[in-house]
Image: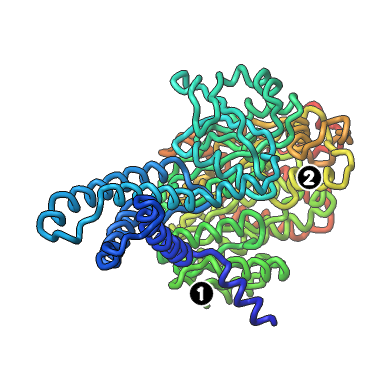
Amino acid sequence: MEAYKSLVKNLLTPTKSKRFFFFLFFDMFIIAISFYSAFFLRFGFTFPSRYFSQFRYWLAALLILKIFSLYLAGLYKINWRFVSLTELLNLILMGTVITTVIFITNLLIIRRYLPGFDLPRGIIIIEAFLSFFLIGILRIAKRVYIQLANGGRMGKRTLIIGTDYTSERLIKELLSSGKERSHAVAIVDEDPMKIGTRIGGVPVLGGYKKLPKIILEKRIESVLINLPRASHKQVAVLFDIISPLGIRDIKVVPRIDDYDTNIFKSKSIRQLDIEDLLSREPVKINPEKIESYIKDKVVLVTGAAGSIGSEILRQLISFSAIRIIGYEIDETEIFNLERELKVLKRKNQELVFILGDVRDREKLDMVFERHRPQVVFHAAACKHVPVVEKFPEEAIKTNVVGTLNLVETTVKYHCEKLINISTDKAVNPVSVMGASKRMAEMICTSYNDSKSRKPHITSVRFGNVLGSRGSVVPIFLDQIKKGRAIEITHKDMTRYFMSLPEAVVLVLQAASMGKGGEVFVLDMGDPVRIVHLAETLILLNNLIPYKDIDIVFTGLRPGEKLFEEILTAEEGTIVTAHDKIFTARNDSNLNVKQINRVVKKLEKALYSPEKLKEILKECIPSYKNQHGNKNETK
């Protein structure tokens, strides 16, 4: 029984070859029936016996010529449920041409040179009309069936914002996209040449300023933003217009650079998310320059299973590193990451995952001795400000001692490059986390200035990454999911945000530019008010801020700022060849010996929090050890 069900399922599962033979069989059947019926209609529902002999020859010729013409017209490559006027016009055109050829051949050649084998002109015309009419009916049958099967319900009344060359197909796909089907009732576009026209039978109405009026008059239930090249600011403006009107179903069509006629555009449609509204303009990179120092290299990434580390691994796969080593302390996360990435790697690439801690000098030494990495990305860190403020010794052991261990190991094994991932919290730090990361930058700078010119050591400093573990976005989403109030420490708090792939690709670009000793600073764009972020997330989840989900303010936590800075006034910036990457002026004058003395002092004072902070203050004059709401005026 199971075998029978499996056989039936396989037979009914559509494939290109099955579709081809399905149409081929029924087209041949239609041509044969039409040819036979043409005699009955021409001769008063009788079949004259004098035509019996040439019937089979003519039928064979018609089958060959018409099937070949249908193939040339592309009518065996169509997607059955999305047949359009274009395919029907191709059928009419090819039918007209082939019928004309047959008609002239019968009249001028066969009648003259093969008397007795010619056909009455009426037979050719009737057969042509019947066969191409029925072939056309066959081609549109599935589309008609799907629309009738909807039971009169066409789907959500949908407004499409923006037009492109795939708009007509998109409209058809929406209507046939299963449970979530939509019925496009209007299109809005800013192009005056398109306003007043129709695309796929749907009217194109006025510009974005008329959106509120159009949404109300057309009783719109869903909006689809079909602007794959729009900036996040344009999308945010549209969202601010649409959401107050009660539209909760807002979707976007992402960019499709290489649009294939065999790809359903509707399958790429997704719900509007926070990255569409907060991420920055698309970043231009030089992939050739990145690949030039990554391709065929052995690359090690610490903190490999974290948000930044795991994305670096994914990018390294695409930039053709020959061996990629993930060094991580969390056994569960490294297990999950290995399962994910082993299906992404290329045939000539090797992925190695090592359970280890940057605090463990001997383990690092063993790993470098065995694998000899040429490029190292240091993403391992204690990064959660409130937690680290309670346990400052852990930040020192990982962010300071761990960084020193890694730097000295890369120097020992003559690696080519070390890229230290830093944070905007290292600027004018008010937390132990920020101060420890600033110390990590200083360690990297001092060792780069030592006698050994290898590795070239650089740091890259940037702000918050959207959706990373422990960031506000997943925390807020969890609170919304549970129906709890969103908790924000202060109503005026702002932060810089960047998408994860963008942050990592800029890290790779900065690393390709580094000559050693630099602290690169990524342009984070405009700061985002956390309250606005929370309100937007609530709206994106089809809820109303302060009604369905409240927002409460809990007060600043120890080590927390109202706003983050990317550069200090003392540092300033130096422009680079990339408009989104800057270099901070070096304000550290500590050499390797001084750095080692400071680290030893910190290790001795590990379990004396106040002493630790005093030592950090001595090395980092801008460090302000603040607690609670004392920094509220910051």
Can you see residue 321? no
* 66 sits left or right of 29 in the view: left
> Label 2 to label 1, Cα distance in Å?
41 Å
Q: Quadrant of the C terminus?
A: top right
Q: Quadrant of residue 310?
A: bottom right
Residue 602 percent location from the top left of the image = 73, 56
| Residue type marked 1 | His
Q: Quadrant of residue 147?
A: top right
Q: Which residue is mark 1?
A: 371
> Along the line of sight, which residue is nearer the eye, 481 or 279?
481
- What residue do we see at 41% from left, 60% from top? 33
> Along the line of sight, which residue is nearer the eye, 574 or 132?
132
Give the answer, above or below, for where 310 lies relative to 475: below
Residue 494 percent location from the top left of the image = 72, 32
Can you see residue 305? yes
Q: Quadrant of the N terminus?
A: bottom right
Residue 288 percent location from the top left of the image = 37, 52
Label 2 crowd bin: few (<14), some (14–19), many (20+), radius 10 Å: some
| Residue type marked 2 | Leu
Of helix, strand and loop, which one carries label 1?
Answer: helix
Q: Earlier in the sequence, mark 2 or mark 1?
A: 1
Picture disc at residue 477: 2
Residue 174 percent location from the top left of the image = 60, 42
* 537 sits left or right of 287 in the view: right
> Along the line of sight, which residue is nearer the eye, 552 or 244?
244
How many numbered badges does the structure rendering display? Answer: 2
- What residue do we see at 30% from left, 44% from top? 96
**Chosen colour scheme:** rainbow
Label 1 crowd bin: few (<14), some (14–19), many (20+), radius 10 Å: some
The mark closer to the camera, 2 or 1, is: 2
